[in-house]
Image (cartoon, rainbow, N blue to C red):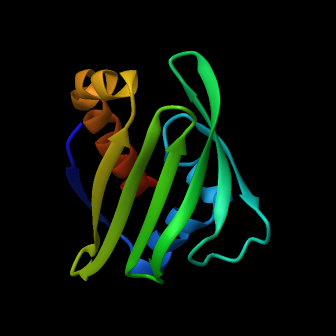
Amino acid sequence: MTQQVLTVTVPAGPPAVFRYLTEPELLTRWIDGLRESRPLGDRVMRVGARSIEVVEAQGRTMEIVSEVTALDPDRMLAVRITYPGAGDTDMVYELAPVASGTELRLTVTPRYRGVARLVGRLMQPMMRRRLQGNLDRLARVV
């Protein structure tokens, strides 16, 4: 699966959008299939902060690990998502103020291992639609 870049304009300022990217109780409002986000350790958002994400997809429930890899409040958040036995994905959210609110750019870089590589390539169009759907939902709920 190759790197993907998606964008959406959110009719709210960067601080409001950033809250929806970083507060566990708000993540489930816009990420399809996310049932719970449990911070590991304290709830302070910082580089190295980790959480367990409970995700339901295609009738299966799994836990994935999320780790903040870079952070610039109200401007940028980078997260590495680790899938047990399948690899990981880097997700970089960049926020820029625009006249109508915030332009949010998401860059997704997957690194799958083993059989997950083949499956990832086959599922790339579906994953792109799902990610864009998440961003569109975010624009509606903020």
Q: Is residue 104 left or right of residue 20?
A: left
Residue 142 in sight from this viewpoint? no
Vertically, is 38 above or below 98? above
Quarter holding residue 56:
top right
At which x and y percent is residue 133?
Answer: 34, 40
Q: Is residue 22 left or right of residue 5?
A: right
Closer to us: 113 or 96: 113
Q: Is residue 16 left or right of residue 40?
A: left
Query: Residue, x 60% and y 78% (percent of image)?
Result: 46
Quarter holding residue 47:
bottom right
Vertically, is 19 above or below 37? below
Query: Residue, x 47% and y 79% (percent of image)?
Result: 71
Vertically, is 40 above or below 60? below
Quarter holding residue 105:
bottom left
Vertically, is 108 above or below 114? below
At which x and y percent is residue 48?
Answer: 60, 71
Q: Furthest residue to the front?
A: 114
